[in-house]
Image: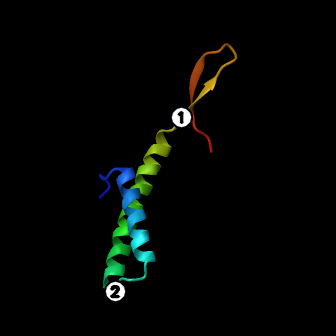
Amino acid sequence: MSDIPFEQSLARLEDIVRELERNELDLDRSLRLFEEGITHLRSASAALKTVDARVQQLAEAADGSFDLVEFER
């Protein structure tokens, strides 16, 4: 499932939450949706970690040029 785009996983998670919040599902359906949600959550989290590892910020030097520097938290 990690090959699902981040935006698609996030949208599906939002759908799952809305469906679960309606409280109209039987226990089996709720559990299946919860499990699917966990899978999408892990996929989205992995995508964010990948992006976070690649994030760099541009730092402007005194002479007006830009240098790539690693992103610091």
Secondary element type, mark 2: loop
Residue linked to disc 2: 26
Who is closer to the viewer here, 35 or 11?
A: 11
Label 1 is placed on what type of residue? Gln
63 over 70 or under it: above or below: above
Who is closer to the viewer here, 70 or 63?
A: 63
Quadrant in the rendering for residue 31: bottom left
Quadrant that contains the C terminus? top right
Residue ID at (37%, 57%): 9
16 over 3 or under it: above or below: below
x, y percent for residue 4: 31, 53
Residue ID at (51%, 38%): 55
Who is closer to the viewer here, 12 or 65?
A: 12
- How packed mark 1 is, by other alpha carbons closer than 10 Å (few <14, some 14-19, many 20 or more), is few
x, y percent for residue 18: 43, 70
- Earlier residue among tags 2 and 1: 2
Cα gap from disc 2 to disc 1, whole angstroms: 46 Å
Residue with the most extreme bottom position: 27
Residues tagged 2 and 1 counted as in contact (Cβ below 8 A):
no
Q: How is the image coloured?
A: rainbow
Residue linked to disc 1: 56
Quadrant in the rendering for residue 10: bottom left
Answer with left or right where residue 59 lies relative to residue 31.
right
Quadrant that contains the N terminus? bottom left
x, y percent for residue 28: 31, 84
38 over 55 or under it: above or below: below
Residue ID at (33%, 69%): 36
